[in-house]
Image (tube, rainbow, N blue to C red):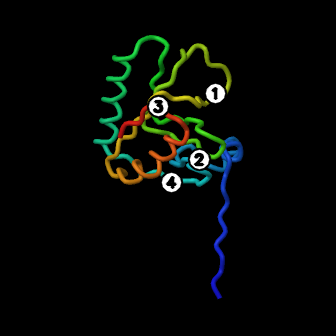
């Protein structure tokens, strides 16, 4: 007799509550993608360097009123809070009050050192459904 495997889909509210309660440690590399908790792979030096170079280039290209966020959460929908390598959002840092996770990035960048298929298929679909205007891999 085959047993049925049950899984739990997590909401962003539940996920953030678990973080606030200290259930997940800061050094745990987790993302909430489509209701699933996904463990992110550790980064190598080439990956980190690529992120820094992209960050420098984006900051140089964008004027005031734009923020380049590095590996920080983006609230895409009720079940997704990815932490892309880079995201560009409108607004000045000084205007933020309290806990504020942007929900409307104009650009998301993923550096795909070893995650190209996942970044294309899974994250690409997630970002498209959320209406992210531009997604670079």
In percent of width and height, residue 58 lies at: 36, 23
Say few, some or many: other residues with alpha carbon within 10 Å of mark 3 (under 14 / 14 to 19 / 20 or more).
few
Q: Nearer the viewer, residue 102 or 29?
A: 102
Point out which mark residue 133 bears.
3
Q: Which quadrant of the structure image shows residue 94?
A: top right
> What quarter of the picture does the C terminus occupy?
top left
Viewer can see residue 42: no
Assign a secondary structure to mark 2: loop
Per the image, the residue denoted by label 2 is 25
Per the image, the residue denoted by label 4 is 39
- Real-space Cα separation, disc 1 to disc 4, in angstroms: 23 Å
Judged by depth in the image, the label closer to the viewer, 1 or 2, is: 1
Relative to residue 18, is residue 58 depicted above or below? Answer: above
Per the image, the residue denoted by label 1 is 100
Q: Is residue 131 left or right of residue 45?
A: right
- Real-space Cα separation, disc 1 to disc 2, in angstroms: 20 Å
Relative to residue 88, is residue 36 depicted above or below? Answer: below
In percent of width and height, residue 107 lies at: 44, 30
Which mark sits nearer the N-terminus, 3 or 2?
A: 2
The total number of labels drawn is 4
Which mark sits nearer the N-terminus, 4 or 2?
A: 2
Q: Which quadrant of the structure image shows residue 85?
A: top left
In percent of width and height, residue 114 lies at: 33, 52
Judged by depth in the image, the label closer to the viewer, 4 or 2, is: 4
> What quarter of the picture does the N terminus occupy?
bottom right
Q: Is residue 130 left or right of residue 21?
A: left
Which mark sits nearer the N-terminus, 3 or 4?
A: 4
Q: Are marks 3 and 2 in contact (CB under 8 Å)?
A: no
Judged by depth in the image, the label closer to the viewer, 3 or 4, is: 3
Looking at the image, which residue is at 39% across and 40% down?
110
- Real-space Cα separation, disc 4 to disc 2, in angstroms: 13 Å
């Amino acid at each position: 007799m085959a047993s049925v495997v049950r899984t739990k889909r997590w909401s962003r509210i539940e996920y953030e509550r678990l973080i606030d309660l200290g259930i997940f440690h800061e050094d745990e590399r987790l993302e909430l993608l489509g209701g699933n908790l996904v463990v992110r792979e550790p980064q190598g030096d080439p990956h980190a360097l690529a992120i820094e170079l992209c960050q420098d280039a984006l900051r140089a290209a964008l004027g005031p009123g734009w923020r380049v966020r590095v590996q920080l959460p983006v609230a895409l929908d009720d079940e997704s809070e990815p932490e892309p390598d880079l995201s560009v959002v409108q607004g000045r840092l000084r205007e933020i009050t309290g806990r504020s996770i942007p929900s409307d990035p104009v650009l998301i960048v993923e550096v795909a050192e070893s995650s190209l298929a996942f970044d294309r298929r899974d994250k690409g679909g997630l970002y498209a459904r959320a209406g992210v205007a531009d997604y670079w891999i």
